[in-house]
Amino acid sequence: MRLAVPDLHQEEQVHQTGVALINLLGVDLFKFINSSLENSDGTDWLTTYRKSNLVYANYNFIDPSNLLKELLRVSTSPLRKPIRSLIEPKDSVAFFNRLQVVLDDRNDWVHHNSKYTNEHLKTLILNIYPIGVKLNLGIKLECDFLLSKLDGVTPDIAQKEDSAFPEVDSPPSKPSKMVETLAKVISKDELPIGTLVDSDFLEYSYVLHLTGQVRYRKSDVLLSEVNPQNSETIGALLIARKPTGGRLRLTRSGIIAAYFEDHWGYLATVSPDQWFPEHLHLTV
């Protein structure tokens, strides 16, 4: 365990642990890339690459922000080669989408754009964990430890927090009365949960917390604060369909999408009066 064991009752320590975990991902990910490229391209591969562009003259790839941006934005980067050697082409889009989610997480945590609770930390860990698994990074140990500390469950590789469909042998959780109430007005033509949403998203971005609370990321305002008459029912439905919570996006037609394994998938449809005021305007 390379991280200090946090007091989960102290928000400052939860924040420090999240930032430290992201930094540790940068260390482990670059260590994996560097070791692979030294074997394939020689020990001076990094010096050669830095000479290829003045931008890289003093570039620190251990910095998770620099490293993730390089991997996501430079399609010709040699740093992608070790990843491509392990990730099958059919899984490549999903993997790089996950790197983007972690980069977004990094920006939130480093720039204090979030509240730092146990559920936020757990969401961050669950976003990072599959990267460690797929590339066999040492950070898996820290993720396992922290997850165990957070909820007493030691995860294994088969556990995927963002599977589009639940395991067949998993007992369904009993829906709340609020979910049952909302289900009565849901169209029978509703898309299956997790169906790819390929419509353009509005500029708004949200977080679904494990409590069912929905937070607008830009202002940190909760749906319950601006729409108390609908927030509890909507939140209960969303968390019942996506028990691990996470990021949400919204289309002009009122479709709420959540991030699944490799795509933004269907979660629910809301009307303007059920959502944040002024965020949604449906036209006839």
Image (cartoon, rainbow, N blue to C red):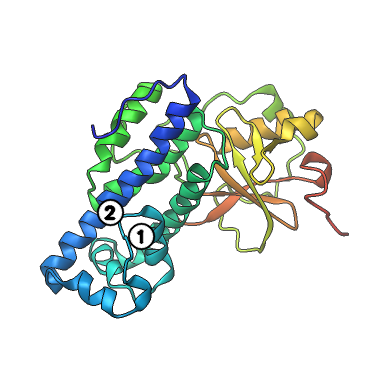
Mark 1 is surrounded, within 10 Å at the Cα level, by few (under 14), some (14 to 19) or many (20 or more) other residues, namely some
Instruction: Compute the Cα span from label 2 to label 1.
Output: 8 Å
Q: Is residue 90 in view from this perspective?
A: yes
The residue at 75%/56% (across/down) is 253
Q: Which residue is mark 2?
A: 29
150 and 51: which is toward the camera = 51
Which residue extends farthest bottom?
A: 52
Sequence-first disc among 2 and 1? 2
Q: Give the label, 2 or 1, closer to the camera.
A: 1
- Classify 78 as above or below 132: below
Labels 2 and 1 touching (C-beta < 8 A) = yes
Relative placement, left or right, of 177 versus 57 is right
123 and 87: which is toward the camera = 123
The residue at 29%/29% (across/down) is 145
Which residue extends farthest right?
A: 284
114 and 213: which is toward the camera = 114
Q: Quadrant of the C terminus?
A: bottom right
137 and 51: which is toward the camera = 51
Q: Is residue 260 in view from this perspective?
A: no
Dividing the picture into quadrants, the one containing residue 234 is top right
Q: Secondary structure at mark 2?
A: helix
Q: Which residue is mark 1?
A: 67
Residue kind at label 2, given as amino acid type: Leu
Residue kind at label 1, given as amino acid type: Leu
**Percent x, y of residue 189:** 70, 50
**Percent x, y of residue 126:** 41, 40
Relative placement, left or right, of 222 versus 159 is right
Relative placement, left or right, of 131 versus 261 is left
Q: Secondary structure at mark 1?
A: helix
**Percent x, y of residue 43:** 12, 68
